[in-house]
Amino acid sequence: MSSSKTPIRVAVTGAAGQIGYALLPRIANGDMFGSDQPVILQLIEIPNDKAMAALKGVAMELEDCAFPLLSDIVLTSDPKIGFKDAHWALLIGSKPRGPGMERNDLIRENGPIFTGQGRAIAEHGHSSVRVAVVGNPCNTNCLIAMHSAKGLPRERFSAMTRLDQNRAQAQLAARAKVPTTSVTNTLIWGNHSATQVPDYKNTRIGGKSAESVIGDLKWLQGEFFSTVQQRGAAIIQARGLSSAASAASALIDHVRDLVRPTPAGEWRSVCVSSDGSYGVPEGLISSFPVRADGKGGWSIVQGLDLDSFLKQRLQATVAELAKEREVVANLLS
Ligand code: NAX
């Protein structure tokens, strides 16, 4: 298949990592931007021989797939080159948590990566560039990149809770013994962390509240909550490695659904800069029910009701986000 469309330039950091390996063939196959939309992959890794050799190997495999939509591949460790004219910047690369490292240490270690990348995206990206952050802690890394990308509107930045949404959708479908397609408007609030809040009240099964269809509040507030919150750890336990195929698939969903208009009456879980909705302090990158307009804009769905359990959990996850913001306050000037 050939296409007369101008290629979309997609910059991907951490491209030689696990998620990159599962993600890049799917972008090149048209899963993210459509089956008639050519892409140029601009792959960014750290400047060390091992990482760059691995990146070269990934590029060789992409070539060997002979994807009709893959117009070009750029390999670099220089963010200026990697983000040049990029329409989308997918920030996946970050340092993993080392032995004995606390969450705050990880936040401090990774922060500077996202200041540099935020600046480079603003300076070298396409004037319409949009950014999706996956590298953890993704909400706070996104906050740092957003603050560092001087001149870029806040609306261009998002972080990913789509994997959590998809996990919650699968758990509810299994419990209700329905196909995953019967579970709609699945909603995650707050931080992409163990404090995240899967909302059983506003998520629907067959058009009705999941709470009423499942009919077991104890399960929803107990096992359902902890399964979704701890799913990442359970995958590591089982596989010896963190989620990669499902994370890549979620990122495909995340970007695709920000590009296309959201169907009437629906929303998707996306971490965006808060405007104060639902009591989330202004400026925090928190997961909300989001609708996309298909023209690059989005809005937070208003007026959803939460019960006292969900409200209290939302406060706790937002308090965690506020604390993370304090830890990196020096990077947000
Ligand atoms: P890997 O360790 O397999 O790959 C990370 C890659 O990033 C490595 O190749 C490394 O060299 C590269 N890298 C590190 N710093 C970089 C920099 N400054 N510029 C460019 N590249 C850089 O990790 P992987 O399993 O692919 O996971 C990547 C990130 O996604 C991790 O931070 C992980 O915690 C996070 N995740 C986020 C999820 C989410 O839902 N938001 C879910 C999956 C995943 O856990």
Image: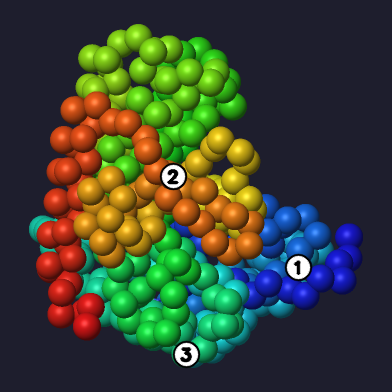
| Placement of the N terminus among the 4 image quadrants | bottom right
Residue occupied by mark 1: 38
Residue occupied by mark 2: 301
Lateral position of residue 247 relative to residue 26, left or right: left
Residue 73, x across and y down, in percent: 66, 77
Dot 3 beta carbon under 8 Å from ligand 1: no
- Under mark 3, the amino acid is Glu
Label 3 and label 2: CA atoms lie apart by 32 Å
Disc 1 element: loop
Pick out the residue farthest to the top: 215
Disc 2 element: loop
Q: Which mark is residue 123?
A: 3
Instruction: Relative to 165, say whether 63 is above or below.
Output: below
For marks 3 and 1, give the one nearer the viewer. Answer: 3
Q: Give neighbour class at mark 3: few <14, some 14-19, many 20+ (Cα, 10 Å).
A: some
- Under mark 1, the amino acid is Pro
